[in-house]
Image (tube, rainbow, N blue to C red):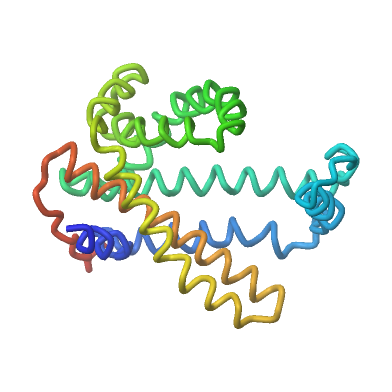
Amino acid sequence: MSLVILLEAMKIHKLRHEKTVQLWFVLLYVINLLPLVLPIGDKDFTPLLGAFAEMSAGRFDVPPVGDLLTPGNWLIIGLLLLTNLVTLFFGLMYVTLFVGEKDDRTPRQAVLGCFRALPSLLALGLLLLLPALFSALMAFIPLVVFLLMIYFLPLNLTLERKNLAMALQDSLAATRHRKLFIFFKVVLLSFVLSLPQRLVQSMVTSVLAYYALSTFFLVLQSFMHARLMGILYLYLVKKVPFVIPSKPDTAA
């Protein structure tokens, strides 16, 4: 079953609205690539990396982070943070469409459902910000456990149109005694994807080619993990015994 789930998670194009997914993939790829290749900001983080290296060697008399970053560095950090949030949103649209197609929902309905859920998701993110910082003292283990507990919350918001409290409650119930199962699938998929990524990246010498490949694998991983979430939602929540691969809609 684990192998079947992983293989199905990799088939990101297997939706009835295949052309929509292709469009989303290309658009997200361009959004993530532009901050890396455009001549904006300062992409040189050598002082900060040097400070981290010194701290790893046991030296802690390094300047504050604010003194090591230029305004251009902060611009790049802000753009990368923004593109990461956009990437998460595209992943949410994908998984909402993937599961929604079982009930004949359209891409438009999936997108609208994601936008309706956005305020609740942003509110939850703000509430988690401070606990996430404290969880860093324990190697982020508490944060990882909580994220596994609310693994299905986004779909409860976008598909079931539940309020945040009810979506949280239902996700806690759905992941009870299944958190290790979900964690294993997520980690295994990440590991499998990392192997070809590292191999291909080690073969390129051009900075632009490295950026292009890294962005491709970033978008690919986002869609695959979104599809994995949809598969596990159908299997664990909707009790679908086996997820039949979607067939492309040639008329889409």
Q: In the rendered view of the protein, which quadrant contains the C terminus?
A: bottom left
Residue 189 place in picture, x, y as percent: 37, 59
Across and down, in percent, residue 198 comes to: 54, 72
To which quarter of the image does residue 113 belong? top left
Instruction: In the rendered view, tell whether residue 109 sits above or below residue 98.
Output: above
Q: Percent x, y for residue 239?
A: 11, 41
Q: Position of residue 211 (x, y in %)?
A: 64, 68
Q: Quadrant of residue 150?
A: top left
Which residue shows up at 29% across the image and 22% down it? 162
Task: Report how many numbered discs are placed on residues in the image.
Answer: 0
**Nearer-the-camera pick, 202 or 37:** 202
Image vertical order of residue 171 relative to residue 240, above or below:
above
**Could you tell me which residue is drawn at 17 percent across and 46 percent down?**
104
69 lies left or right of 107: right
Q: Is residue 24 above or below residue 100?
A: below
Quarter where residue 155 is shown:
top left
Among all residues in the image, which is located at the extreme front? 58
128 to the left or right of 71: left
Q: Residue at x 57, y 64 (%)?
A: 215
Up-down: is 30 above or below 122? below
Q: Quadrant of the N terminus?
A: bottom left
Q: Is residue 120 left or right of residue 58?
A: left
